[in-house]
Amino acid sequence: MPGETHNGMQCNEFETLLFDALDQKLAEGQRERFRAHARVCGKCGPMFAEVEAGQHWLKSLAEVESPANLVNEILAATTGIQSYRLQAPAAAEHRASLGERIREWADSLFAPVWGTVRQPRFAMSFGMAFFSLSVALSVAGVKPSDIKSADLSRSGLRRTYYTTTARVVKYYENIRLVYEIESKVQEIKKVTRPDERKQEKERERNHKNNTSGDPEPRQERNYSRDENQPVLASGPQNPLAVSVTTTRRDV
Amino acid sequence: MAWEEIVQRYNRRIYNICYRFAGSADDAQDLTQEVFIKMYRTLSSYDVERGAFMTWLTTMTRNLLVDHFRKTKQDRVTDSMDAAPSEHEDAMPLSEQIEDKRLPPDARVQSRETGEVVHEALQKLSPELREAVILRDLQDMDYRDIAAVLKVPEGTVKSRINRGRAELARLLQRIYRQVM
């Protein structure tokens, strides 16, 4: 009800004076009329009480302290220079705590590495490497469950080394034995079939003497049978004459 | 005046404005840094004849806070005393919105400082009312300077301050009425 008048003051005038009234800036006569209106007006009285209470609540809020590192961060962000005035007591505090110094040193050491590790590309590469390794191990038949803590001890590692070395040497010796046996067998074959050896030598000699440049005649030897074996499939000496008689049909 | 001296002298004041307006200490720290970075870049453009340094600095802070508010798109819970309650407000009273439902009312009052409750209630005011009461009642600025900072007429400043105070009182009354 802005137009309502109580004690010679309208509600809209009361609202206008409200701010100054709370700041104690009203003249004596004005203040009296203002208070009288607040007492009798059903709208302005509660409104005045609320505004006064709100001001009281707001004034009760204490000023908060800014963070200790704020000035340094601002100076570092603007000028790139940190305040030594603030750093000196901070440094003294840090000197007292060895654990914090070690943690800071570790952070400065691992922060760049950790920053790289946290990149998605690195995580992807690491995942692929891990996948490849696990596939390779599973193909090789190595199971992580087979690995025991004892295997990683000094004696265990030494035992693994000697076992692996012995296995490699044994494999080498076996291969060597196989080759030796094969070469012996070939030598025995040469000794038992001298004719074949002679034929091979002659063939080699002919091949060397042939300087005409013509291609070597194709060897049409049928390796699937011997010379005295009967020919099972061959064409007829004279081709068969087939006489075809056609009759013309008039339609 | 050296730059470091300016930072030393005004950082607390700017931090308090930011903290009371943004609500969180982390945001306030970031915003305070932004204010000083902006001030460092534009310090040469400050003209003594155009107004007091504090008004210039507060205007810069206020503009940055408004930008921050627009970016974060906070919901405007209250507008003014005279505004009709929205559907949202009907569905959930403001006093219920700011209360902590994890604890019973009496334990809540005991566990939380009065200052925290008032600070939380302050965040529920609309930005227009909040900035006006912060500058007036927390920073003790003259309403003429506030009018210069907010770029609104002096009468509007007075009206916003009154509405902001009254709205805050109503919010807090509802809270304390519930817990008593």
Image (spheres, rainbow, N blue to C red):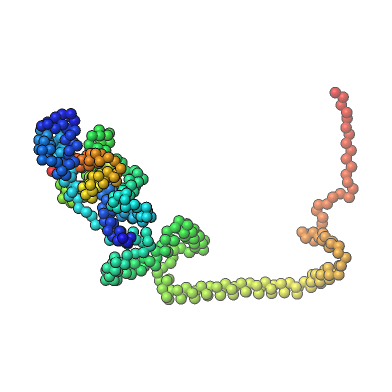
Question: In the image, A106: left or right of B139?
Answer: right
Q: Position of residue B16 (x, y in %)?
A: 26, 52
The residue sitting at 81% across, 71% down in the picture is A201
**Residue A21: quarter of image:** top left
Q: Give the position of the N terminus of chain B as an image quadrant.
A: bottom left
Q: Position of residue A150 (x, y in %)?
A: 40, 71
Please determine whether, in this image, residue A3 is positioned above or below residue B122: above
Q: Is residue A213 above or below residue B159?
A: below
The reply to whether residue A54 is visible in this rendering is yes
Q: Quadrant of the C terminus of chain B?
A: top left
B105 or A251, nearer to the observer: B105
Question: Height in image: A1 above or below A227?
Answer: above
Relative depth, front residue between A198 and B47: B47
Q: How many marks?
A: 0
Q: List the single residue furthest toward the front.
A: B49
Residue B176 visible in the snapshot: no
Q: Is residue A151 left or right of residue B166?
A: right
Q: Residue furthest top?
A: A251
Image side of residue B141 versus residue A208, left or right: left
User: Closer to the camera, A199 or A92?
Assistant: A92
Q: Residue at x 44, y 61 (%)?
A: A116
Q: Residue at x 30, y 61 (%)?
A: B5
Q: Position of residue A213 (x, y in %)?
A: 86, 64
Q: Residue B99: x and y, percent?
A: 22, 44
Front-most of residues B64 and A205:
B64
Q: Residue at x 10, y 32 (%)?
A: A7
Q: Quadrant of residue A228?
A: bottom right
